[in-house]
């Protein structure tokens, strides 16, 4: 049973803070359910958390006020987090703030809950500060404020993150292993805190009686953890999920396949596996279907295109009938009904459909956006199209060139927000105006942009260069390197069209299919593609094809000759005609510049060096914290040995406490000396101890205070006690003196007070 003396040592002071930290760390491991790895964010959180917890333990042992403890934890935690995340110790200053903005901008581009798992290192600038804040808040609640059960709120907040990103399906990706370790650690923390609270009252009167299990705290702990883990599954999710797609009901956010992350890897993989099979049932069964759209990206953040915020009513189902997007139905081709089946390899949470569906029947939790006609799963990644079949009737849009040329002002009748753009470099607007100079109609401006990418702009298609989509990368793509794949061409044309006021979006899906012996059309992984769609009055979304012809693309027939040009394909390198080679796009005609690569390498080395510098600073702070007690003890010893008998007596008591010898600080000098005598053995130190006791008694109880010092006697007795102690006790007394962390005891109250009264009477 823990006694009152047990709760004042170093180990008890570390028990609750460390178990609290471990509990939060276990809970933070749940974030690995939506990241590619745990170490890139858990590693820095571990370092920062140990610094925060270690600072709190050290400061509390030194009897620092609680508000100062929190201030120190915030200061050191902020410095460590800044060094690890942005390689700057003060992220609130000018230079530090600029780095924070840059890192957060890049992390926002990588933060994509629609294509899981996300890059752990990419989103670490979000996860590391959030995890460090969780550790700090938990320590404040459980230790500083002494409210450990309230720390369950922190666990609740931590577990809400995967539920918000992944959805309630599969318990938000939280494994039962994480649940078990979190619950166990939380209960251990509650038990340790309860033992310490009871221990402060002293020895129990019923220690000899059988111990009755304390079921109350255990029940509270289990209930708190269960609520923290299960409540997010019952709580309704917000209608908007960062950074794009919103949920339609309380079942969690919808997920999509975001090509800004996944499409590039899928394109480079050039998979020959069949992803979708389309079988014409009736209608125009001879015309080959093409451009099977998976989804549309409608929002440009400045660093990437996302699905935007979608309005998905909760009363929708996977059965829907749509009116044609234009009043003149002659613009539609002959409707065709298809039976579509997705392979088990195609795990999309968006349902592939053709651009202008008229009727769709899909079993399962599918809903649609009336503005974009995208079908999306309401169950997140737990419900995908893999292995499913659905039926669709669609008609191709066949607008005449005359009708497109006669389209009115851009944006008439378009869904809202389709021309929105963030702040971009001025060069992009200048390029849009320059490449469409002399064209005063939206359609001719769009054709001019398409022709520039495909014909006159000297662009090259290649999968060997991933150039990004932020403002600077876009300017570089349009002016210098001009090498990219379909995603760059689609996003670039969409941005330029919006600069001109033409509603635009980026669609992604499959380019063309191959017909098998049974007449079905198969779309393979290598057919993945992205293209821009522009809105025209009373026509709707119209496809354009800016990707160069070397990528096996062709411009739509309604764009040929719109500017008086003869339709022809550019003189671009063609892929190898080797029959044994899989279809692949052409490679770039020139190598990438070496300077950016060298700069990137230097930046990586600089970042790595800054991280190690930060870790070194954190380790130095920890070493200083560990060495502080020994330094304090030495300075205290020097000052006391030069003082009076009372100061020397306090020094002798601290020496006994450091060596683990019996010393309460509340008994009389003779009783304390009796406890130390067996550890002296020799006559000379015994005599010195008697002189010390006599001096202390005279100082406390004599009519006139004795100011004589007994420093030499204390040195002799202390040296003898250390000599006769075991090696482990001596090492502990030198490195981690327990007396530093013990509240000092005052001399017997009867001493100075009684002497003062006698002096007053005698006077």
Image (cartoon, rainbow, N blue to C red):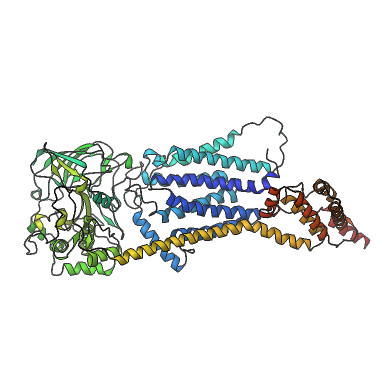
Residue 177 seen in this snapshot: yes
Residue at 30% over, 57% down: 304
Compared across the picture, whether 661 is left or right of 572 comes to right
Residue 78 seen in this snapshot: no
662 or 19, which is in the foreground?
662
Q: In this view, does 335 lie above or below 215?
A: below
Question: Farthest right residue?
Answer: 762
- The answer to which quarter of the image holds residue 518 is top left
652 or 336, which is in the foreground?
652
- Quarter of the picture containing the N terminus is top right
Give x and y (percent) for residue 113: 34, 49
Give x and y (percent) for residue 79: 51, 61
- Quarter of the picture containing the C terminus is bottom right
Give x and y (percent) for residue 435: 17, 67
Residue at 17% over, 65% down: 457
Question: Farthest top residue?
Answer: 210
Give x and y (percent) for residue 334: 8, 44
Q: Exactly how many numbered labels are in the figure?
A: 0
726 or 702, which is in the foreground?
726
Compared across the picture, whether 85 is left or right of 341 comes to right
Q: Is residue 441 above or below residue 22?
A: below
């Amino acid at each position: 049973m823990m006694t009152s003396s047990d709760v004042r040592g170093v180990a008890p002071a570390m028990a609750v803070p460390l178990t609290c930290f471990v509990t939060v760390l276990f809970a933070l491991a749940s974030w690995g359910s939506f990241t590619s790895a745990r170490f890139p964010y858990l590693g820095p959180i571990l370092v920062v958390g140990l610094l925060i917890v270690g600072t709190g333990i050290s400061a509390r042992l030194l009897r620092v006020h609680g508000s100062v403890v929190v201030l120190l934890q915030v200061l050191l935690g902020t410095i460590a987090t800044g060094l690890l995340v942005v390689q700057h110790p003060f992220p609130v200053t000018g230079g530090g703030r600029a780095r924070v903005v840059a890192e957060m901008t890049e992390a926002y581009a990588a933060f994509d809950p629609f294509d899981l798992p996300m890059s752990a290192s990419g989103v670490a600038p979000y996860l590391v500060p959030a995890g460090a804040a969780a550790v700090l808040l938990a320590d404040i609640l459980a230790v500083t404020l002494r409210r450990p059960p309230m720390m369950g709120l922190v666990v609740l907040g931590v577990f809400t993150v995967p539920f918000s990103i992944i959805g309630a399906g599969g318990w938000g990706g939280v494994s039962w292993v994480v649940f078990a370790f979190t619950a166990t650690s939380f209960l251990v923390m509650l038990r340790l805190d309860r033992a310490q609270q009871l221990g402060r009252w002293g020895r129990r009167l019923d220690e000899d009686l059988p111990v009755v299990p304390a079921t109350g705290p255990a029940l509270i702990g289990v209930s708190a953890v269960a609520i923290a883990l299960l409540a997010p599954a019952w709580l309704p999710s917000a209608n908007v999920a960062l950074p794009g797609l919103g949920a339609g009901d309380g079942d969690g956010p919808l997920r999509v396949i975001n090509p800004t992350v996944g499409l590039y890897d899928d394109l480079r993989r050039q998979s020959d596996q069949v992803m979708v099979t389309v079988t014409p049932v009736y209608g125009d069964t001879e015309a080959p279907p093409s451009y099977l759209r998976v989804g549309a990206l409608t929002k440009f953040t400045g660093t990437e295109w996302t699905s935007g915020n979608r309005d998905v009513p909760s009363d929708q189902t996977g059965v829907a009938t749509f009116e044609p997007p234009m009043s003149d139905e002659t613009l539609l081709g002959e409707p065709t009904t298809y039976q579509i089946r997705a392979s088990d390899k195609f795990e999309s949470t968006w349902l592939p459909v053709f651009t202008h569906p008229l009727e769709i029947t899909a079993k399962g939790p599918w809903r649609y956006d009336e503005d974009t006609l995208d079908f999306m799963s309401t169950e997140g990644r737990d419900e995908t199209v893999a292995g499913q079949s659905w039926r669709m009737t669609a008609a191709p849009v066949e607008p005449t060139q005359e009708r497109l040329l006669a389209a009115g002002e851009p944006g008439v009748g378009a869904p809202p927000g389709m021309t929105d753009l963030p702040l971009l470099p001025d060069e992009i607007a200048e390029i849009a105006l320059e490449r469409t100079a002399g064209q005063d109609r939206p359609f001719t401006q769009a054709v001019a942009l398409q022709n520039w990418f495909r014909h006159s702009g000297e662009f090259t298609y290649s999968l060997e260069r991933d150039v990004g989509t932020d403002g600077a990368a876009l300017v570089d793509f349009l002016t210098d390197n001009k090498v990219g794949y379909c995603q760059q061409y689609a996003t670039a044309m969409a941005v330029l069209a919006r600069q001109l006021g033409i509603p635009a979006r980026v669609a992604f899906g499959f380019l063309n299919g191959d017909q098998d012996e049974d007449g079905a059309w198969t779309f393979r992984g290598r057919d993945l593609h992205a293209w821009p769609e522009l809105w025209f009055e009373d026509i709707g979304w119209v496809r354009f094809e800016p990707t160069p012809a070397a990528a096996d693309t062709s411009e739509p027939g309604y764009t040929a000759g719109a500017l008086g040009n003869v339709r022809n394909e550019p003189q671009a390198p063609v892929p190898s005609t080797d029959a044994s080679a899989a279809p692949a796009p052409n490679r770039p005609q020139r190598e990438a510049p070496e300077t950016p690569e060298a700069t990137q390498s230097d930046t990586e080395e600089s970042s790595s060096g800054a991280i190690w510098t930060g870790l070194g600073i954190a380790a130095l702070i920890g070493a200083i914290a560990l060495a502080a007690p020994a330094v304090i003890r030495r300075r205290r010893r020097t000052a006391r040995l030069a003082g009076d008998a009372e100061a020397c007596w306090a020094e002798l008591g601290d020496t006994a406490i450091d060596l683990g010898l019996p010393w309460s600080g509340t008994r009389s000098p003779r009783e304390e000396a009796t406890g130390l005598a067996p550890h002296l053995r020799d006559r000379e130190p015994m005599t010195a101890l008697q002189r010390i006791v006599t001096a202390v008694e005279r100082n406390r109880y004599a009519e006139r205070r004795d100011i004589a010092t007994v420093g030499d006697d204390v040195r002799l007795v202390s040296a003898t006690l250390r000599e006769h102690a075991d090696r482990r006790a001596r090492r502990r007394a030198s490195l981690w003196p327990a007396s530093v962390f013990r509240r000092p005891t005052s001399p017997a109250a009867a001493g100075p007070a009684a002497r003062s009264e006698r002096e007053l009477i005698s006077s």
